[in-house]
Amino acid sequence: MGVLYHGADYNPDQWLTRPEILEQDIDFMKKAGVNCVSLGIFAWATLEPSEGNYNLDWMEEIIDKLWAAGVHIDLATPSGARPAWMAEKYPEVRRVNADRIRQLFGERHNHCYTSPVYREKVCAINQMLASRFGRHPAVIMWHISNEYGGECHCELCQKAFRKWLKEKYGTIDAVNKAWNAKFWSHEYRDFDQIESPAPHGEHSVHGLKLDWKRFVSYQTIDFMKWERDCIREIVPEAKVCVNMMYHYDGIDYFEQAKDIDLASWDSYPTWHKPGEPLWETALDTALMHDLYYSVKKQPFWLMESTPSYTNWQRVSKPKRPGVQLLTSLQAIAHGSDSVMYFQWRQSQGASEKFHGAVVSHDCREDNRVFRETCDVGAALKAMAEVAGTGKEKQAAIVMDWSNKWALEDSQGPRNIGMGFWQEMQRHYNGLAQNGVSIDFVHPQEALDGYKLVVCPLVYMMSEEFTLRLREYVKNGGTLVVTYWSGVVNETDLVWLYDSPHNLTDVLGVRRLEVDGMFDGEKRACRAVCAGLPETAQGSVLCEVAALEGATPLMVYDEEFYAGAPAVSVNEFGEGKAYYVATRFEKDFYKALYKTVGEGVLESVYPYETEEGVLATRRGEYVFLQNFNDHPAKAGEWTLEKYQTLVLKQTQDGYEKVF
Ligand code: GLA
Ligand code: ZN
């Protein structure tokens, strides 16, 4: 029988002088069905109050008590925040900003990942923890650091960057060529002349900026591997995870996922946003759940979420009654094997004192948040059999951090923003509203098994990737490619000749021009086929393409490009390739993917469902969730407001699990 984990970030180092609080914690954890906590994430100053003087006894006592109460430990390395003594004695551990100013002590997540001193100190504390607790039966996972991110421009990092470039390119001439450095005479004669991008230095060579981002991601992952390997020197079988973030741009999470055992993420949607139905916020969250399932193509953990308020948002809103259960189970529906919160108990002071937590300042078990957390605990227990089940391959959306970096850094065609995530979200929602299972794939991943591959704003395409897309369609796959795709190669040099590169015959169109649109500017389009909305509005970029064999489905209806394809389809080999020349309004995509999916995609729950009811599937389990604040129908079922129904598919229908 599987286990779904339920718990929180647990920071008892804030309460060591209050034994009655620690006692209540254990009692309340039992009541809430807690079976796992992430322990000691920011506890370094308590674990090592002065250099080399370790104090781990308190942690041992707590681990033993937790284990006696049936609580597993996701043991944290404390490298997310360093003690003051270290920042004072070893300035090199403190990050240097892009303007080359070194930070003072304070805050968190701001260390130099290259600094040998920092690495040595981190290794020492990690090994102390590993020797002492690494084989404790309660410890099932290591929470490596916390939300890795940011970048450092110190001299040590500059040297590491140059070394990385040398390994990548071999010669300085190869660097100049890759970056088109002849432009403005920005050629380098020696690797030592290269500096990271700076506001008072180089910030116009896109190849340099792109490689800097890749290096920062590489160096962060290298640091993570260092932490992991220090632990594994003591406990070779130690399992590790990291917690990833919403829309985070600084790390290529596909790369990072290769070096961990479990992916997890911290989810803080703005539920109850005025003017946005809950189901729409839910789809935004669902995209991230599916992304973090996809980085390893295996179940992930919801590492953090709030049971009530998120105090760093513009306005803090408590989740409405029932919404904690609904949104927690949404993570499970998308492939999480846990529901964890930040944090277990509200802090008494400092910046997160008004952040929601399982135990509120009133320390009462009749508190609504606590009671609803108990409901989640009971629900997870009741549906534990879904743990470990995976998702079916249907549609794949291409996601590549390098592409995003290059796309957003480019000057033109739209410096007011390309809206990368908005574009992704439209395709995601269109598929999700048709009940399709969605994965994200990196361009280097195999596409086999997917019925549909979507390339939204895949501006950067390597030769190799374009050739694989050709093969994919030729062999019967269905492909959707949007405007501004296949424009540059992997070092951001524009592909010469016909574009989208290597895909003009696959798509049956050839890019001619791109009309950048101001915010709010719209371009009328009309359908020339059945199934798509009769009229729609293009925005953001209106790409103008020549039809070279494709059949238009929508055309522009105004401007000098009236009649040019806004959506088209082309048969190529055994497959089909769709081209979407602009960004349409949100509603358009449900219809688009109904058309694209006809005879190609299967719905996870092929029955009529009301708007606001979202269906997903893991293994043989179908989750139906009603994000409406009123009852709604899904097939033969009527769901109460905010209800989740978990069904198991059997030979003769569905059996209710929850
Ligand atoms: C992040 C951090 C936590 C906490 C929460 C608050 O996810 O990892 O330490 O600050 O945000 O929302
Ligand atoms: Zn540095």
Image (cartoon, grey):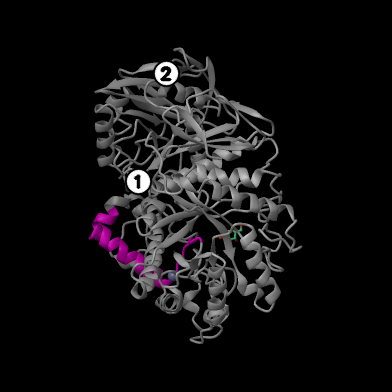
- Amino acid at dot 2: Ala
At horizontal 38% and vertical 35% (from top left) the residue drawn is 485
Around disc 2, counting alpha carbons within 10 Å, would you say few (fewer than 14), some (14 to 19), or many (20 or more)? many
In the depicted structure, whether residue 596 falls above or below residue 499: above
234 drawn magenta? no
Residue 341 in view here: yes
Q: Main secondary structure of the magenta part?
A: helix
Q: Where is residue 299 in the image (x, y as percent from the top left)?
A: 43, 49
Around disc 1, counting alpha carbons within 10 Å, would you say few (fewer than 14), some (14 to 19), or many (20 or more)? many
Q: Position of residue 518 (x, y in %)?
A: 56, 33
At horizontal 42% and vertical 45% (from top left) the residue drawn is 389
Say which residue label 1 marks.
492
Q: Where is residue 336 in the image (x, y as percent from the top left)?
A: 48, 48
Marks 1 and 2 in Cβ contact (< 8 Å): no
Mark 1 CB within 8 Å of ligand 2 = no
Say which residue label 2 marks.
564
The one nearer the camera, 123 or 398, is: 123
The secondary structure type at the circle numbered 2 is: loop
In the depicted structure, whether residue 422 falls above or below residue 102: above
Q: Can you say which quadrant of the picture contains the C terminus?
A: top right
- Amino acid at dot 1: Asp
